[in-house]
Image (cartoon, rainbow, N blue to C red):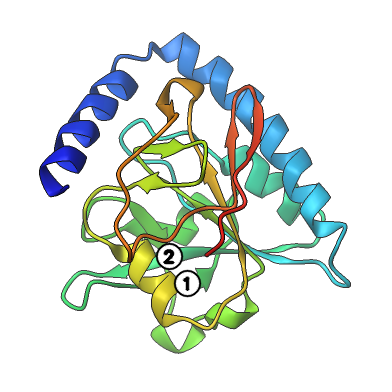
Amino acid sequence: MAQDKRALRQHYLRLREAVTTDQRKAWNRALARHLTDFLTELAGRAAAPPTVAGYVAHRGEPDVAEALSAVAQKGWTVVYPKTNKAERTLTFFKANPSDTKAFEPGPFGILEPVAAEDAAVPGEEIDIVIVPGVAFSRDGVRLGYGGGYFDRWFADVNTHAVRVGVAWNLLLADDLPSAAHDVRVHDVVTEAGVVRCRPSR
């Protein structure tokens, strides 16, 4: 299965890298609209403004900054992951999505929040997690980058957060290999709309 995942990861990364700049901008705008609407729909079920975990796009990933800025303006709390490479863990911290000075490169070159360790937001306080990935299947399987950071965080943290994957439509597969420890997403948002996956775990 590891070889299958490695080959699929390379395949989908090549597809992502081949997307033109103009096409990427158009898809980002469309995805931001769908994601903002979907997050707003999810928030309608909450008694208070939710806390949503996002990410800063890296290496051609779908850019969710516009959607995160939109919900921050509604009074939501937005948090981002910091990576501990030695321990292979994630910890989430508040950051203003519109403030570029609030971020700095992490160990993998991905922008992460500038924050003191004692300011971490507990996982049980996070209501929605926007999960990056290389590709997703229509039944919620996520093909990640191979580090297992998000799977480990979901397994270790007491959270009932809604898991929302984001991907271009061309990175949405009918089927992807999945191991027992892989945590599936509940929904995937693309530039074409929302795919409801609703996994059992």
Q: Nearer the viewer, residue 104 or 182?
A: 182
What residue did someone put label 1 on?
92
Q: Please give the name of the residue rendered at 50% of the width and 23% of the height, measured from the top-left corner.
A: 169
In terms of secondary structure, where does tag 2 sit? strand
Looking at the rendered structure, the kind of residue marked 2 is: Pro
User: Would residue 160 be visible to someone looking at this image?
Assistant: yes
126 left or right of 151 in image: right
In terms of secondary structure, where does tag 1 sit? strand
Badges 1 and 2: C-beta atoms under 8 Å apart? Answer: yes
Looking at the rendered structure, the kind of residue marked 1 is: Phe
Total labels drawn: 2
> Where, by quadrant of the figure, is residue 50 drawn?
bottom right
How many neighbours does mark 2 have within 10 angstroms: few (below 14), some (14-19), or many (20 or more)? many
Q: Please give the name of the residue rendered at 40% of the width and 81% of the height, measured from the top-left corner.
A: 156
**Circle on res. 80:** none
- Against 106, is 29 above or below? above
Q: CA distance from mark 1 to mark 2?
A: 4 Å
Q: Please give the name of the residue rendered at 26% of the width and 29% of the height, measured from the top-left corner.
A: 13
What residue did someone put label 2 on?
81
Across and down, in percent, residue 9 comes to 23, 36
Across and down, in percent, residue 8 comes to 23, 32
Q: Earlier in the sequence, mark 1 or mark 2?
A: 2
> Where, by quadrant of the figure, is residue 121 drawn?
bottom right
Going by the picture, which residue comes out furthest to the left? 3
How many neighbours does mark 1 have within 10 angstroms: few (below 14), some (14-19), or many (20 or more)? many
199 left or right of 46 in image: left
118 left or right of 159 in image: left
Across and down, in percent, residue 32 comes to 65, 33
- Against 180, is 159 above or below? below
Across and down, in percent, residue 127 comes to 67, 68
Q: Nearer the viewer, residue 169 or 64?
A: 169
Q: Nearer the viewer, residue 17 or 201?
A: 201
